[in-house]
């Protein structure tokens, strides 16, 4: 079984305690449904900056990461199917699925 990173873009922070509770329940339910396919629940990410030879760009470029999760899957297609259930999609975000290459 391979490991994949689900990298999140967009979504939003809850504006009320009730919305926060709804969002947390959705994420916890999704994590619970993943069972042993969940390798690491990851975390939301804060402010990002992009570093290049030309300097530092505040804001993480045109599409900064907003969080990540690590999952176990038999194939990239299987990892994509896992990503389709991610709660960030309901909040307008997207999920980038990347295979982690063991070195």
Image (cartoon, helix red, strand yellow):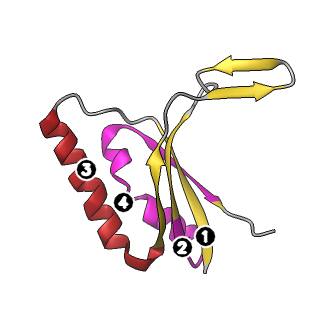
In magenta, the rendered stretch is: 71-98
Local packing at callout 1 (Cα closer than 10 Å; few below 14, some 14-19, many 20+) is: many
Horizontal placement of 61 versus 102: left or right? left
Q: Which of disc 3 and disc 2 is earlier in sequence?
A: 3
Label located before the other in sequence (1 or 2)? 1
Q: Reading the chain from its start, which is encountered first: label 1 or label 3?
A: 1
Q: How many marks?
A: 4
Foreground tag (2 vs 3): 3
Q: Are marks 1 and 4 in contact (CB under 8 Å)?
A: no
Give the numbered dot on residue 3: 1
User: In terms of depth relative to the viewer, which is nearer, 65 or 56?
Assistant: 56
Does the magenta run of residues contain 83?
yes
Q: Residue at x 69, y 19 (%)?
A: 57
Find numbered disc 3 in the image and state the secondary structure of the residue it sits on: helix
Residue 49 x %, y %: 64, 26
Q: Which residue is mark 2?
A: 72
Please give the residue where the numbered disc 3 appears in the rendered image: 24
Residue 37: where, in percent of width, then height?
A: 46, 75
Residues packed near mark 4 inside 10 Å, few (<14), some (14 to 19) or many (20 plus)? some
Q: Quadrant of the N terminus?
A: bottom right
- Disc 1 and disc 4: Cα gap in Å? 17 Å
Mark 4 to mark 2: distance in Å? 15 Å
Let me know if residue 67 is in the magenta part: no
Marks 1/3: CA distance? 24 Å
Residue located beneath label 4 in the image: 85
Secondary structure type for disc 1: strand
Left or right, 50 with reference to 27: right
Question: Quick one: label 4 or label 3, which is nearer the N terminus?
Answer: 3
Mark 1 vs mark 2, CA separation in Å: 5 Å
Disc 4 is placed on an element classified as loop
Residue 9 locus on image (x, y percent): 50, 39
């Amino acid at each position: 079984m391979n490991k994949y990173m689900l990298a999140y873009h967009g979504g939003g922070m809850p504006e009320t305690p009730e919305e926060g509770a709804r969002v947390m329940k959705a994420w916890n339910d999704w994590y619970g449904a993943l069972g042993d396919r969940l390798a690491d629940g990851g975390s939301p990410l804060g402010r990002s900056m992009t570093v290049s030879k030309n300097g530092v760009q505040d804001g993480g470029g045109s599409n900064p990461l907003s969080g990540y999760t690590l999952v176990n899957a038999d194939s990239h297609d299987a990892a994509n199917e896992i990503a389709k259930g991610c709660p960030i999609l309901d909040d307008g975000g997207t999920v980038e699925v990347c295979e982690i290459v063991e070195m």
